[in-house]
Amino acid sequence: MPVGRTHRLRHLRVFRGTPEDGGELVEYSVPVQEGMVVLDALHWIQANRAPDLAVRWNCKAAKCGSCSAEVNGRPTLTCKTRLSDLPEDIPVQVEPMRTFPLVRDLVTDVSWNYEVNRRITPFTPPEDAPEEAWRWQQEDIERVQEFRKCIECFLCQDICHVLRNHETRNPFMGPRFLVRAAGLELHPMDRADRTPYLRDGGGIGYCNITKCCTEVCPEHIKITDNAIIPLKERVADTYYDPVQVAWRKLFGRRSEGGSGQPIPGQPSADGS
Amino acid sequence: MAEIHTSPDTLPAVSTRMHTPGGTALQGLGRTSRRDFWWLQPGIVAAGFGAFIVYSLFSALVWQPMFHVPYEVDGYLSPFFSPLIQPNWLPWWISPAVLILWIPLGFRTTCYYYRKAYYRSYFADPPACAVGEPTIHRRYAMERAFPFILQNIHRYFLYLAFIPLLFLWIDALYSFVNTGPRFGLGGLVLLVNAGLLTGYSFSCHSLRHIVGGRLDCFSCSSLARVRYRAWQRLTGLNQDHMLWAWVSLVSVALADLYVRLLAWGVLVDPAIRL
C-alpha cells in the first residue's frame, strides 16, 4: 500500500526481540485506510519497514487461530481487531501472547498446549456398537457442537490467570482443553469417564471461574458456563457429593451420566 | 519515518514455573499492558457488594436489638427474617435472622457468579483479565484445597435455599390478607422480591446440572426428554444468572428497607383495603 496524502498515520508500538535480548517495543508509523485491522498494519510494517518482523498468520479470516497476540494488553486475533476500534490518542501496542514462551517478536511457542492435549482420553465409543450403527438426535449433540467451533487460537489459555500468573504444584490443563474434555464427556456416544483426570491431572479445581476465557473467545463459545461449570459439577458429583457417592457405593455405578446409558437411537428399557 | 525504540514494560521470561507454559506475563498486582479503565468494573462490584454487606449486617443483626426498629410491621415481614424463628433460648441481643440468613449467605457465597465477582473484586485473583495479581497468590491452590474446595457444596445450599424461598412467597401472599383483605404496596414489594429471588434460584448452574446436565443422552428415554425440555428452559434463565443475582440482591435489600421505614414511621404504606 503506497503512502498517499489521503491516508492518516497511526502509531504502533510493536514488540521486537528474542528471549536472549529481552526485546523492546519499537514504534512505527503506519498509513491506515478505513477497515484496516491490526494484522494489516503489521503486514505494512513487514513490507515497508521491518522485513524481519516475525508474525504468525494464515487465513486472515478469524478461522485459523494463528494471529493471536495482545493488542493494548488484551489477547485478541490481530486479523479481527480493527484499528478504528482502538483509541486514537495513544499508540497501538502489539505484544506476543504473554502466557507462552517467546520465540521471536510476535511469535510464541504454543507447543505446551499440544502436550496437554495428548493427555486427554480420546473419544471412546462403545465397543459393542459398530460405527455404522451409531445414531443420535440433534438434541443429544447440540451441546457438543458449540465446542467444535474452537479454532485453537489459544487466546483463552493466554488470558487464563492460572496459566499466566500462578505456579501450580499440579498440572492445570486450561480452558481450551476443558472445552475439549467437555466435548467428549458430554458426547452421547462416549463411554470414557474423565472425571478422575479432570480433578487430578487436569486440575479443574484451579479454575476459579473468573470468565476471562469466555470474554476473549473469538468464536463466542460460552467456555465457563457451558464447558467448565458442567465439568466442575460432574467432578462434584463424583467426589464431593455424599449422596452421589453413597448411590455409587450402593448400586456400583454412576447414578447418571455417560457410562451405562443406552446407545442413542436404540430403544431403551422403558420402550421409548 | 523514524522508528523509536523503547524498553518494554515487561519482566524477563519466567522459566521456572511448574506445570505452566512459562511465558513472559507481567507479574505483580495491577501490572498490565491494558490501556482501558480495567479497575472500574471490579471497583463498582466491590462497592456494590460492600454496600449490601454493610446494610444487611446492620439491618439483620443490629437494627432491631440495638435501635428497636421492628422487622415486622402491619403484616409485613422483612425478607431477612423469613421464616421467623424465635426460640426461647435465643438471647435478646442475638437477632433471629442469624438462624436463617446462613442459608442464603451460603447459597450466594458458593454461587458461580458471585465467586467470579468476589475473586476478582476482593481477592484480586485476578483483579481483571490480563492484569497481574499479588505475587502471594502464585502458589495458591484455589478450589483444589481448603477453604475454597467447599465451593463444591453449592448444590446443598441450593436445596436449602428453596425453604426460605417458599416462606417468602407465603409471606408475600399472606400479607394481602393477614390484616384483612388489602392491596398494599408492601405486599407488591414482597411479591416482586420473591419473584426475583425465584429467578435467581432457578437460574442456578447447579440446578441446571441436576435437572439435565448430568445426562449425556437427552433422547434415550421419555424421562430424559422431559428433563431435556426443563434443562433448556433453565439454560435460558441461566444465561442471565448475573442479572438475576444483582436484581435479587438489590430487591431483598429494598424490601427490607421498605418494611423498616414503615416500622420506623418514615413511610406510610399506600393500600386499598377491601
Image: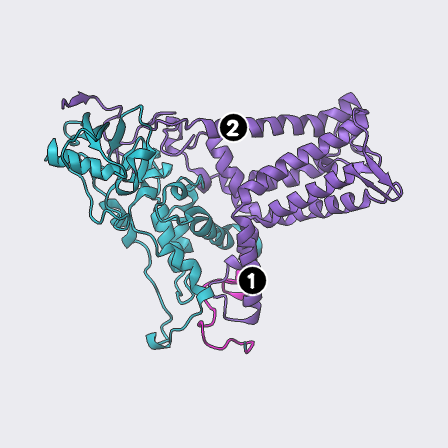
Give residue B229's mark: 1
Magenta stretch? A245-271
The reply to the same-chain question for discs 1 and 2 is yes
Residue situated in front as seen by the camera: A91 or A182: A91
- When asked about the image quadrant of residue B265, the answer is top right
Q: Position of residue B103 (x, y in %)?
A: 65, 41
* Kind of element beneath mark 2: helix
Q: What hue represents chain B? A: purple
Q: Which residue is mark 2?
A: B44
- Residue at point 63%, 34% (across, down): B250
Give residue A140's mark: none
Residue situated in front as seen by the camera: A214 or A200: A214
* Residues at marks 1 and 2, CA–CA distance in whole angstroms: 37 Å
Pick the quarter of the image with the N terminus of chain A.
Answer: top left
Q: Position of residue B238 (x, y in %)?
A: 54, 49
Q: What hue represents chain A? A: cyan
Q: Position of residue A49 (x, y in %)?
A: 12, 31
Query: Within the magenta stretch, is there residue B133?
Result: no
Q: Is residue B124 left or right of residue B61?
A: left
Q: Is residue B240 left or right of residue A29?
A: right
* Kind of element beneath mark 1: helix
Q: Residues within 10 Å of mark 2 (few under 14, many from 20)?
A: few
Residue situated in front as seen by the camera: A85 or B63: A85
**Residue B58 versus residue A261 in the image, above or below:** above
- Tell me the amino acid under the disc marked 1: Arg
- When asked about the image quadrant of residue B94, the answer is top right
- Tell me the amino acid under the disc marked 2: Ile
Q: Chain of mark 1?
A: B
Nearer the N terminus, badge 1 or badge 2? 2
